[in-house]
Image: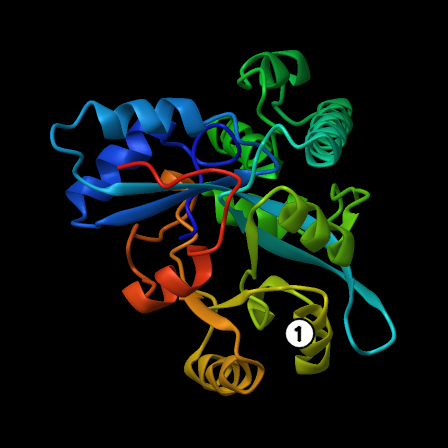
Amino acid sequence: MHVHSSESDGTDTPAGVVRTAVAAGLDVVALTDHDTSAGWAEAEQAVRESDPPALRLVPGAELSCESSDGRGGTVTVHLLAYLFDPDSPALRDEQLRLRAERRGRLEQMARRMADDGFPVDPEALMAGLPPDSPGGRPHLARALVEGGTVSTVSEAFDRYLGTHAPYYMPRTDTPVERAIRMIADAGGTTVLAHPFAVTRGQTVTAEVITELAGHGLRGVEVEHPDHDEPARHRLRELVAELDLVPTGGSDYHGTNKNIRIGSENTPPDSLDRLLGDCTGSKIIG
């Protein structure tokens, strides 16, 4: 329920994501590229070309949002959105804004690094992005790997591109409460991704998740590679208390991350609870 393709910052094409999911033995996969639904059509075609369809495809996206951290500050959170209508005007306009900002930010970061002597070609980097892709730091990280500056994408983030690294640049995200409303108005549903992943940086408190449930948040990603067992235990208790839907996802990015697709899963009953009332789009397959 949490997979990225080359339409954002993964390395598999949308059709490749479907083939990888089939090979892994999954019966459902959600395509959740950052701030775009551009990969939906290709992934749907890959599912339909399998006769009978080898799995079901859940069209989705991962939205970057701004939230209170519950401690007096703000933090970027990620919202997994499923089965929304991508042509909903408010949502479409906001995703266009976010993609434009992501691409502009990526180009600025690349130019700063090129000006400082790194083997990065900003024009080639931007030209290599799919037209509707927001682009992201992993694209620049791969350029640093290809140029021999670092050995891995993770090293590029640690040394140069991470939140507290020298070439990081912030962006303006959608307020999370607004994003939850936009997705609901577009017939979809939302899940808070990896909320207790402390290895990623600052996290939100349980009180924030409680508040977001009051704004219409439907689920929480409990099973995630960046959640240790104590975090999973706390989240399982919290979602039960709030009657939210617990989900799981690998956050697969192809070769950009050393995470196997299907390494974390969502129980069938959670899937039914989460998606049963969505009207914006349909499950494929």
Residue 166 point in image, percent of width and height: 76, 46
Give residue 34's quadrant in the image.
top right
Residue 4 point in image, percent of width and height: 44, 40
Q: Is residue 229 above or below residue 78?
A: below
- Under mark 1, the amino acid is Ile
Residue at horizontal 71 percent and vertical 23 percent from the top: 114
Q: Is residue 108 above or below residue 27?
A: above
Residue 161 visible from this viewpoint: yes
Front residue of 57/118: it is 57
Q: Is residue 260 above or below residue 123?
A: below
Apparent side of residue 179 relative to residue 134 in the rendered image (left or right):
right
Residue at horizontal 24 percent and vertical 26 percent from the top: 48
Q: Which residue is mark 1?
A: 209
Q: Could you classify mark 1 by the number of other residues whose Cα lies within 10 Å: few (under 14), some (14-19), or many (20 or more)?
A: many
Apparent side of residue 187 relative to residue 53 in the rendered image (left or right):
right
Residue 170 point in image, percent of width and height: 79, 45
Give residue 5's quadrant in the image.
top left
Residue at horizontal 72 percent and vertical 81 percent from the top: 207
Front residue of 137/29: it is 29
Quadrant in which the C terminus appears: top left
Give residue 169's quadrant in the image.
top right
Residue at horizontal 62 percent and vertical 37 percent from the top: 35
Residue 68 point in image, percent of width and height: 80, 67
Apparent side of residue 29 relative to residue 165 in the rendered image (left or right):
left
